[in-house]
Image (tube, rainbow, N blue to C red):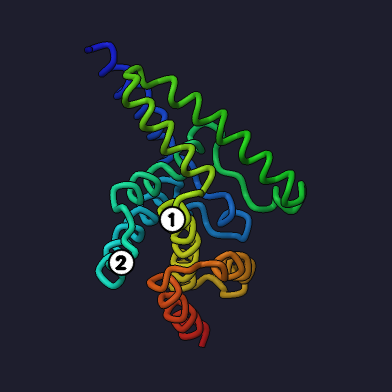
């Protein structure tokens, strides 16, 4: 039992804590100062907070289409966890490889990193639960997984607005708005869709 506890705390968590030291590469590419760049852990926390808030709002407004809050939170918390194994990489790689090869590359990395992380969990029941969560995250077959994938893009836009409020030029973030908005066109969750115009208005206000 103590061996399992040690492995979980000093193995798994020690790996996960690396996310606090890894900056988000996309922001570095467009010129955000290293002193201002969010870490992957920052992004994961903000995505989780947004997921909880908007999931609660969705469930309150649409009780006939409720989301499983625990599943949403679990997926949001771990959605970038594998990056502690292979680190963050920018969307520029997608441009270089092409979308199909990029998705294949990313899927292989996620599978490998997830397997390595799961090897640190000795309890088979816990390992099975986490394995299912990683699979749900990767396959995006559940409505909860899709919900978090959309929130992930929303958090990106919120962070871009935050950088603009610090004085960074609006044009630096045009590509982020373009790709995120295109992805969010498929979103069927009204609590997310209703938020987008508010974000766009705030961006316009900052640019004036």
Return the x and y of residue 145 as percentages of the image width and height. 45, 51
Quadrant in the picture for residue 173: bottom right
Is residue 115 placed above or below 108 in the rendered structure? above
Return the x and y of residue 178 as percentages of the image width and height. 62, 70
Residue depicted at 25% across the width and 69% down the height: 60
Q: Which one is nearer the viewer's eye here, 140 or 85?
A: 140
Whole-number angstrom distance, CA of label 1 to CA of label 2: 14 Å
Residue depicted at 34% across the width and 29% down the height: 13
Report if the CB atoms under discs 1 and 2 are less than 8 Å apart.
no
Q: Residue furthest front?
A: 64
Q: Which one is nearer the viewer's eye here, 23 or 55?
A: 55
Q: Which one is nearer the viewer's eye here, 75 or 141?
A: 141
Helix, strand or loop at mark 1: helix
Is residue 16 placed above or below 169 in the rendered structure? above
Is residue 108 placed above or below 68 in the rendered structure? above
Helix, strand or loop at mark 2: helix
Q: In which quarter of the image is the N terminus?
A: top left
Q: Which one is nearer the viewer's eye here, 86 or 206?
A: 86
Residue 19, disc? none
Q: Name the residue under label 1.
A: 143
Return the x and y of residue 105 as percentages of the image width and height. 67, 39
Residue 64, disc? 2
Q: Which residue lies furthest to the left in this view?
A: 2
Residue depicted at 48% across the width and 61% down the height: 150
Residue depicted at 63% across the width and 41% down the height: 106
Q: Residue furthest bottom?
A: 208
Quadrant in the picture for residue 9: top left
Return the x and y of residue 83 as percentages of the image width and height. 51, 38
């Amino acid at each position: 039992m103590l061996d399992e506890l040690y492995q979980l705390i000093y193995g798994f968590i020690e790996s996960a804590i690396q996310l606090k030291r890894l900056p988000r590469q996309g922001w570095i590419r467009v010129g955000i100062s290293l002193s201002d760049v969010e870490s992957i852990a920052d992004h994961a926390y903000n995505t989780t907070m947004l997921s909880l808030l908007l999931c609660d709002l969705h469930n309150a407004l649409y009780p006939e289409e409720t989301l499983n809050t625990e599943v949403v939170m679990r997926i949001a918390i771990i959605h970038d966890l594998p990056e502690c194994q292979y680190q963050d990489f920018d969307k520029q790689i997608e441009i270089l490889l092409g979308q199909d090869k990029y998705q294949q590359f990313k899927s292989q990395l996620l599978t490998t990193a997830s397997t390595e992380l799961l090897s640190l969990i000795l309890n088979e029941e816990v390992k099975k639960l986490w394995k299912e969560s990683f699979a749900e995250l990767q396959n995006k077959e559940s409505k909860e997984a899709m919900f978090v994938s959309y929130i992930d893009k929303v958090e990106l836009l919120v962070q871009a607005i935050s950088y603009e409020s610090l004085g960074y030029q609006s044009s630096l973030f045009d590509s982020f708005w373009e790709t995120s908005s295109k992805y969010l066109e498929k979103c069927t969750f009204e609590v997310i869709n209703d938020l987008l115009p508010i974000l766009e208005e705030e961006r316009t206000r900052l640019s004036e």
